[in-house]
Image (tube, rainbow, N blue to C red):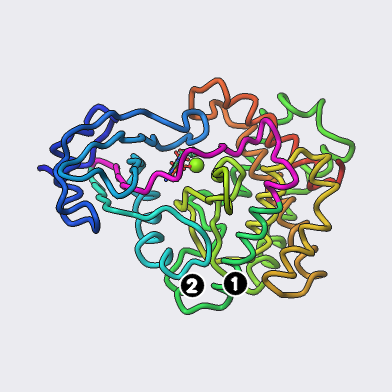
């Protein structure tokens, strides 16, 4: 049972790690002599737990430091597949995956990844800076370009597929959402909410007809870290899927800069995406606007949920910020 998947950081032991690393390139000939696990990214990673390992090895030190990401089985399996199959084709800076295990029965997965820290954590509550958003759009456009129409797309989950259709979630959660946020939405917000059930199927149809590429699928700024030098590192590929580039771009513009900054930057960022990835700028601009409306529907789903699901002091202000940003973007206000 050496390769059992740990459920908590306390279950990460030197013996377990040694078994995991037995075949890992660069680590296989080293003996694990020490481990000082520290949980990182708390309140930023909401579903999983990421542990900086503080690994000591003999006769030589580790070639580079590692983190262990503990996640649910489904997301862990998608991210594992991304790092094994797609990361080698990616034109951007990514951590190396050293080893992984998925336990479907226990609904757990673990990935041992290169530690890309120290780095500044992207933060929706602070609002991403212009330089940060530009750097992420540049990286995003590079992988969107590299995978446009690629063969691997046929093996990926299509963007937007979910167990419960978004329209149903919107219908069910609208009353509580309006109770909480109705009075603080920008002008036009109530009409937007009322229009969502009819608008969403048409938005999906148009976005799914757009040219497809590899999408990150959850490209908010909190899934990005900024090392002191070089390009940003986009993490958390549990939502990797195939779909329209505008979905990632719209997501970042809603869950990155403040609404005022988004309004100032959006045109330049569309230009930047087109300069790197090509495509029709008018079409991308229209699709990003549709992605904003879809994002408002998702934000409604989060804001109208009885409990956000995670207990962390960052979560209530985060839900408020996502609702505010998404409605501002969908209604085109700064
Ligand atoms: N390879 C890494 N190097 C450095 N820091 C990392 C690394 N992976 C994750 N982190 C830190 O942990 C945080 C959470 O990671 P991540 O987003 O992958 O987990 P998560 O959101 O809990 O995942 P999921 O949505 O799959 O449950 C990141 O924002 C970052 O601060
Ligand atoms: Mg994350």
Q: Would residue 324 be counted in the magenta stretch?
A: no
Query: Which residue matches tag 2?
Result: 153
On screen, residue 330 versus residue 230, left or right, reads: right
Q: Which residues are magenta?
A: 106-133
Instruction: Report helix, strand or loop for mark 1.
Output: strand
Does residue 45 sit above or below 290 in this rendering? above
Answer yes or no: disc 2 within 8 Å of ligand 1.
no
Is there CB contact under 8 Å for labels 1 and 2? yes
Residue at image point 15% right, 44% down = 59
Residue at image point 52% right, 34% down = 44
Q: Nearer the viewer, residue 101 or 330?
A: 101
Q: Any mark on residue 212, and which?
A: 1
Q: Would residue 107 be counted in the magenta stretch?
A: yes
- Quadrant for the C terminus, please: top right
Q: Nearer the viewer, residue 298 or 313?
A: 313
The image quadrant that residue 270 belongs to is bottom right
x, y percent for residue 245: 64, 64
x, y percent for residue 196: 73, 48
């Amino acid at each position: 049972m050496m390769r059992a998947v740990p459920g908590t950081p306390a279950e990460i032991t030197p013996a377990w790690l040694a078994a995991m690393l037995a075949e890992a390139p660069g680590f296989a000939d080293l003996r694990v002599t020490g481990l000082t696990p520290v949980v990182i990214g708390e309140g930023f990673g909401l579903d999983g737990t990421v542990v900086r390992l503080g690994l000591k090895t003999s006769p030589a030190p580790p070639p580079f430091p590692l983190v262990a990401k503990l996640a649910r089985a489904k997301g862990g399996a998608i991210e594992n597949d991304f790092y094994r199959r797609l990361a080698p084709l990616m034109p951007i800076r990514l951590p190396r995956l050293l080893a992984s295990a998925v336990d479907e029965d226990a609904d757990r997965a673990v990935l041992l990844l290169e530690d890309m820290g120290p780095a500044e954590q992207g933060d929706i509550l602070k609002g991403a800076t212009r330089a940060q958003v530009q750097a992420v759009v540049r990286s995003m456009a590079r992988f969107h370009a590299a995978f446009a129409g690629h063969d691997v797309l046929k093996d990926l989950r299509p963007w937007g597929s979910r167990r419960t259709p978004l329209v149903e979630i919107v219908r069910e959660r609208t009353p509580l959402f309006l109770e909480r946020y109705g009075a603080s939405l920008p002008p036009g917000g109530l009409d937007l909410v009322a229009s969502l059930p009819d608008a969403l199927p048409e938005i999906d149809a148009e976005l799914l007809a757009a040219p497809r590429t590899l999408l990150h699928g959850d490209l908010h700024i909190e899934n990005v870290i900024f090392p002191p030098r070089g390009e940003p590192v986009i993490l958390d590929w549990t939502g990797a899927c195939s779909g329209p580039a505008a979905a990632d771009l719209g997501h970042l513009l809603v869950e990155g800069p403040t609404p005022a900054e988004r309004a100032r930057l959006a045109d330049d960022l569309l230009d930047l995406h087109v300069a790197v990835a090509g495509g029709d700028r008018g079409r991308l601009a229209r699709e990003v606007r549709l992605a904003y409306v879809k994002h408002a529907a998702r934000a409604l789903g989060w804001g109208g949920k009885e409990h956000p699901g995670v207990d962390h002091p960052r979560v209530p202000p985060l839900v408020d910020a996502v609702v505010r940003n998404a409605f501002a973007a969908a209604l085109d206000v700064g």
